[in-house]
Every structure is written in C-alpha cells, then in structure tokens.
Amino acid sequence: MITISILACLGLLLALFLLVKSAFRGSTLPLTAEWISELSIECYRPMMRLLDGGDLEFLRSQPGFTPAMATKLRMQRCRIFQGYLRCLSADFGRVCAAMKMLLVQSRSDRPDLAGILLQRQLMFAWGMAAVQVRLHLYRWGVCGVDVTNLVKIFDLMRLDLRSMVPASVSVGA
C-alpha cells in the first residue's frame, strides 16, 4: 500500500513538473503591446459552459435517447474542450513569457513580480492538472468540469501584463 501511494505521489509530481515546464516554455511569436491589448477571456466563455450538464439533461428528455448518445456527446465535447485548454495554456504561456522578458529587461529588481509570476504559474499548473483529472472523470459521467479558476488566473496575468506595458513598447520573446 505504501509503494502504491509513493508511486501515485511521484506520478502527480511528474505531471505537475511537466505542466509547469510547459508553462515556462517561450513563444516564437513577437509579443507586442498590440497583442497584449487584444488578449481577452471572451474567447474562453464557450469553454466555460461546454461541459455543462444542461445539454445532456435535454438530450435525456428526448424520445429515442440512448446512453450511447450521451457518451458520444461527452466524448465530442471533451475533444473540443481540450482544444480550448491547449489555447488557454498557450496564451497563458505567452503572457508568462512576456512578463519574464519584462523582468529581465527591468532596470530594477522586481522580486514581488517574480514571486507573483511563480505563484500564478504554479496555481495554473495545479489547476490544469485538476481539470485534466476531472475531464477524464467527466468522460465516464462521474463529475463535471469547472475552468473558472483557470480563466481567472489567466485574466489576472493578462491584466497585470497590460498594466505593465506602455502602449508603444514591444516585448520580444
């Protein structure tokens, strides 16, 4: 039993490490003030209701409903949801890359900003891991998936970055 617990903890730590590592990856796109101003959480609003149980409840109430239909709908929604997750993770990574560039280019040390950046990256990675686990459980109809906290973390980073970059500055990644 102890061995299984240790292996499970090591697996979770590995998953967390890989998520944090992917969040630290840089972007090949130039990060400009214009790009920052175009960032929005609006494109993630559909994601937040994609796995809502309302559609499945409606489907269940229809004549001719079969459990296979619900399973198929859940699988399709999961694939779409994972596409949104990839985009959210990529946008979050770009925002982090821009903030790191600002830290490197800053004329003064910003340990407060570095601490916030690290804290939010860890929170995002942990939230992403939790969402992935819940997404697998959702496929079997066990639970729902809520990405509100992930989107909030992204939005906080986006707003912090927007407040730090003057409209005329370009930040290369």
Image: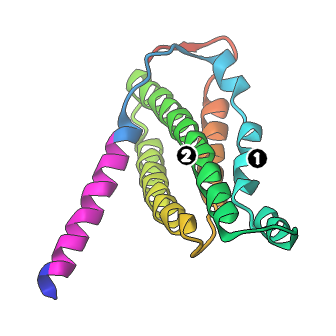
Instruction: Give residue 173's position: percent from left, percent from top.
Output: 43, 18
Local SS, label 2: helix
Of 103 and 141, nearer the camera is: 141
Q: Residue at x 39, y 26 (%)?
A: 26
Of 84 and 115, nearer the camera is: 84
Q: Would you say 6 lies left or right of 98 here?
A: left
Q: Quadrant of the N terminus?
A: bottom left
Looking at the image, can residue 103 be seen? yes
At label 2, the amino acid type is Gln
Q: Which residue is mark 1?
A: 45
Of labels 2 and 1, the one closer to you: 2
Q: Which segment did they paint magenta?
A: 4-21
Q: Is residue 108 above or below residue 80?
A: above
Q: Which residue is mark 2?
A: 82
Instruction: Give residue 124's position: percent from left, percent from top.
Output: 49, 52
Q: CA distance from mark 2 to mark 1?
A: 14 Å
Q: Residue at x 46, y 47 (%)?
A: 112
Magenta span: predominant SS is helix
Q: Residue at x 44, y 23 (%)?
A: 27
Looking at the image, can residue 147 be seen? no
Instruction: Check if residue 10 falls in the magenta segment.
Output: yes
Instruction: Give residue 5's position: percent from left, percent from top.
Output: 21, 80
| Number of marks in picture | 2
Instruction: Check if residue 156 falls in the magenta segment.
Output: no
Q: Quadrant of residue 3?
A: bottom left
